[in-house]
Image: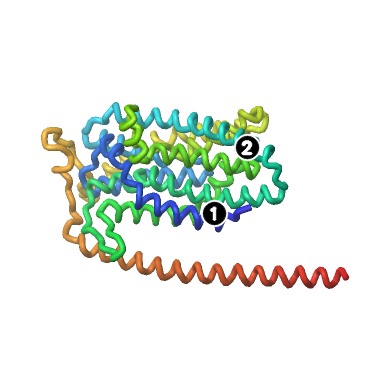
């Protein structure tokens, strides 16, 4: 099967691509929930959500970043005296329920299709497993792209309205201010995937329900489709043109969707192999995370404002709007920050190229050594 290292590298690359190319679609929804109008407030919200996520991950509980950041935004609204948009909150909460349900339905339908294809195609088991392995890599890449497109708003959405950078010309293409921020967020998430995601992968992949390779393929594809649907503005526009209601651009809880997909497979198989104890622990984590994040945000905002004198935001005057009240203390350093990002990208490209070459050479060396070992074994057998 695919090793953790390979899965983490593939996920990191495609998460960054999804974040930069399609990641701005869900930021608007979070902005309507609470328009953070100061960089100090954006930083404190992100810090509170990050601490909550870190602690939940420490106990191997699949926390939803959507719930953590939503809890943090509501905490900021309470602290600054701003109203929380109930319609936007209702839309987000409905997605927390609808996401796992849709994921379960997709997973069951896809699982039935894969089973029927396996039965009718009459492919040899070894060749079928080879196809599944390749499919897992392709679907995993699509899943990472969809995750970056849908969930990057949870990481950087609170910074977008309060932080403005000069457009970055990279010769082939140009990155806008929001895309630069989404890129930085994508790089941060990628480092987390590579260094600290093993425990949660183990909990999701094995402790709820032991999955076969084909079931794993179905689960990842079902989750990817759900995330992609809720982050695709193009698909939403097609719905409008067809006379249908638009698809809400909502940051869906990826951890809830993946658990819903796994649960769907388990229910289809008869629900005897599901570990309901672990499922209950995950459910408790989902309830605790937005509450803990909101409370932590409230106290951190108080601490930052009164101890460090940091401007964490103020009540939005609805007559002037939030955008006119944004305090952009970083405006003087727009060119410097964009320049740093430019050189950072150049460095990542150089080191990434060297890393890929080194990896290819290492894999070829392992392959040659394996071939020699096989030849030596068969010689000894003769």
Q: Residue at x 21, y 43 (%)?
A: 37
The Cα atoms of the two marked residues, 1 and 2, are separated by 20 Å
Marks 1 and 2 close (CB-CB < 8 Å): no
- Where residue 255 sits in the image (x, y, percent)? 48, 39
Of all residues, the one furthest to the right in this rendering is 382
Q: Camera-side residue: 260 or 18?
A: 18
Q: Which residue is mark 1?
A: 7
Q: Residue at x 36, y 43 (%)?
A: 154
Any mark on residue 184, and which? none
- Where residue 13 sits in the image (x, y, percent)? 45, 56
Q: Earlier in the sequence, mark 1 or mark 2?
A: 1
Q: Count residues near mark 2 (Cα–Cα under 10 Å), then give few for <14, some for 14-19, many for 20+.
A: many
Q: Which residue is mark 2?
A: 209
Task: Establish if 271 lies above or below 374.
Answer: above
- Callout 2 secondary element: loop
- Where residue 134 sits in the image (x, y, percent)? 59, 52
Q: Count residues near mark 1 (Cα–Cα under 10 Å), then give few for <14, some for 14-19, many for 20+.
A: some
Quarter where residue 241 is shown:
top left
Q: Residue at x 60, y 55 (%)?
A: 3
- Where residue 216 sits in the image (x, y, percent)? 59, 43
Quarter where residue 211 is shown:
top right
Of all residues, the one furthest to the left in this rendering is 319
Q: Is residue 212 visible?
A: yes
Quarter where residue 70 is shown:
top left
Query: The C terminus appears in which quarter of the rendering?
Result: bottom right
- Callout 1 secondary element: helix
Q: Camera-side residue: 160 or 213?
A: 213
Q: Residue at x 26, y 65 (%)?
A: 339
Q: Is residue 47 visible?
A: no
């Amino acid at each position: 099967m695919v090793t953790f290292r390979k899965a983490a590298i593939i996920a990191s690359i495609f998460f960054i691509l999804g974040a930069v190319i399609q990641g701005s679609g869900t930021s608007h929804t979070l902005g309507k929930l609470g328009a953070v109008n100061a960089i100090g407030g954006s930083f404190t919200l992100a810090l509170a959500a990050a601490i909550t996520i870190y602690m939940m991950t420490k106990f191997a509980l699949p926390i939803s970043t959507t719930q953590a950041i939503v809890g943090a935004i509501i905490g900021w609204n309470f602290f600054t005296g701003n109203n929380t948009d109930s319609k936007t909150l209702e839309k987000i909460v409905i997605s927390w329920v609808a996401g796992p349900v849709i994921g379960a339905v997709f997973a069951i339908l896809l699982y039935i299709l894969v089973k029927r294809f396996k039965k009718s195609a009459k492919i040899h088991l070894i060749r079928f497993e080879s196809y599944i392995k390749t499919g897992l890599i392709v679907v995993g890449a699509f899943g990472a792209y969809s995750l970056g497109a849908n969930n990057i708003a949870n990481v950087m959405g609170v910074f977008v309205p309060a932080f403005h950078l000069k457009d970055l010309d990279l010769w082939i293409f140009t990155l806008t201010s929001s895309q630069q921020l989404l890129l930085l967020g994508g790089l941060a998430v990628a480092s987390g995937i590579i260094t600290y995601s093993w425990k949660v992968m183990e909990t999701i992949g094995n402790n709820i329900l032991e999955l076969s390779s084909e079931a794993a393929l179905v689960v990842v594809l079902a989750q990817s489709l759900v995330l992609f649907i809720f982050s695709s503005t193009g698909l939403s526009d097609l719905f409008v043109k067809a006379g249908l209601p638009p698809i809400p651009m909502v940051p869906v809880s990826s951890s809830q969707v993946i658990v819903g997909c796994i649960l769907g497979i388990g229910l289809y198989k008869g629900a005897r192999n599901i570990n309901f104890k672990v499922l209950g622990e995950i459910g408790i984590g989902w309830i605790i995370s937005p509450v803990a994040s909101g409370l932590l945000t409230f106290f951190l905002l108080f601490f930052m404002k009164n101890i460090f004198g940091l401007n964490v935001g103020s009540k939005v005057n609805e007559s002037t709007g939030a955008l006119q009240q944004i305090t952009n203390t970083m405006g003087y350093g727009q060119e410097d920050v964009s320049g740093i990002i430019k050189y950072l990208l150049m460095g990542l490209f150089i080191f990434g190229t060297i890393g890929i070459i080194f990896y290819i050479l290492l894999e070829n060396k392992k392959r040659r050594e394996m071939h020699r070992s096989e030849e030596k074994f068969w010689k000894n057998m003769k």
